[in-house]
Amino acid sequence: MKKIQLKARIIANKKVSSSHYRLILEQKDILRKARPGQFVHVRVNEGLDPYFRRPFSISRAQEHLELLYAVVGRGTEILSRKKAGDELDLLGPLGNHFCMPPKGTRNVVMIAGAIGIAPFFMLSDYLRDKNYELTLLYGAKTKTQILPMRSLKDNGCRVYIATDDGTQGIKGRVSELYAKIPIDTQKTFIYACGPKPMIDSVLAFAHPNHLKGQVSAEEIMACGIGVCLGCATKTKTGYKTVCKDGPVFDLNEF
């Protein structure tokens, strides 16, 4: 059986926005195996407090393993206090991953809501220099929650931003940017990651326009390996676990 529980040494734990951190880890086994869209399940503290691990998308896997996370509760607040040299217990890489765009694709559109942007840094690393037109549509509540875009832009992404309060980009939800998506069933492929209301809006746009793509689902996870069934989500072919059957699904599964 392959070993998925591993220790990782923290190289840096940097604050990159008002509530977001970039965690840089030394973990060569996961680094070698990781693919865009997969995640790791992190024990944020020794002992049983807090009891459950926290899942984080792998945001980059080049020289080091990188995770992006938002401080939203006790577990992530504990994680934000970790220092360089500390060790973390990880399970990973877990879940399935984004497939590469099908043959004939020209336009690749990534749609992200809030921390759902995390896997697109790594995905854009894979897609750069492959003659795709890369576009990111990114939505957040306010300007201070927008993460730095430099590496995505360096990978050739055109970035369009929407904020709920209009402090950066256009005012409104990310769905206000869907007019940027080329309606071409043969040449356009969509990737989406974000909260369920955003994913629902992507599906409502993609289905009537017969667009292909994949979505990364967000659910609360306890075990991370498909045992507890706590993250089961309804698909057209029955209930599936986000942690093991996903987190990436073909958008036509919903």
Image (cartoon, rainbow, N blue to C red):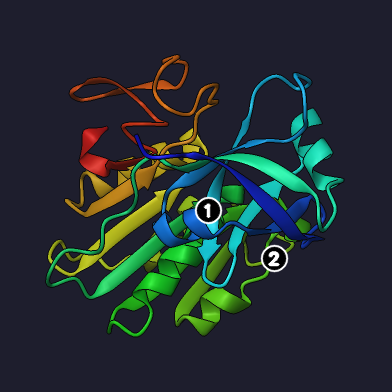
Residue 73 at least partly seen: no
- In this rendering, would 69 be left or right of 18? left
Classify 194 as above or below 151: above
Give the percent coordinates (x, y) of residue 186: 12, 66
The C terminus lies in which quarter of the figure? Answer: top left
Residue 236 at least partly seen: yes
Give the percent coordinates (x, y) of residue 145: 73, 55
- Amino acid residing under circle 1: Ile
Give the class, few, some or many, for how many residues have Cα within 10 Å of label 2's Cα (few <14, many ≥20): some
Query: According to the image, label 2 marks what residue?
Result: 168
- Amino acid residing under circle 2: Gln
- In this rendering, would 28 be left or right of 102? right
| Mark 1 or mark 2, earlier in chain | 1
Residue 156, image quadrant: bottom left
- In this rendering, would 45 be left or right of 173? right
246, 65: nearer the viewer: 65
Query: According to the image, label 1 marks what residue?
Result: 58
Find numbered disc 1 in the image and state the secondary structure of the residue it sits on: strand
The N terminus lies in which quarter of the figure? Answer: top left
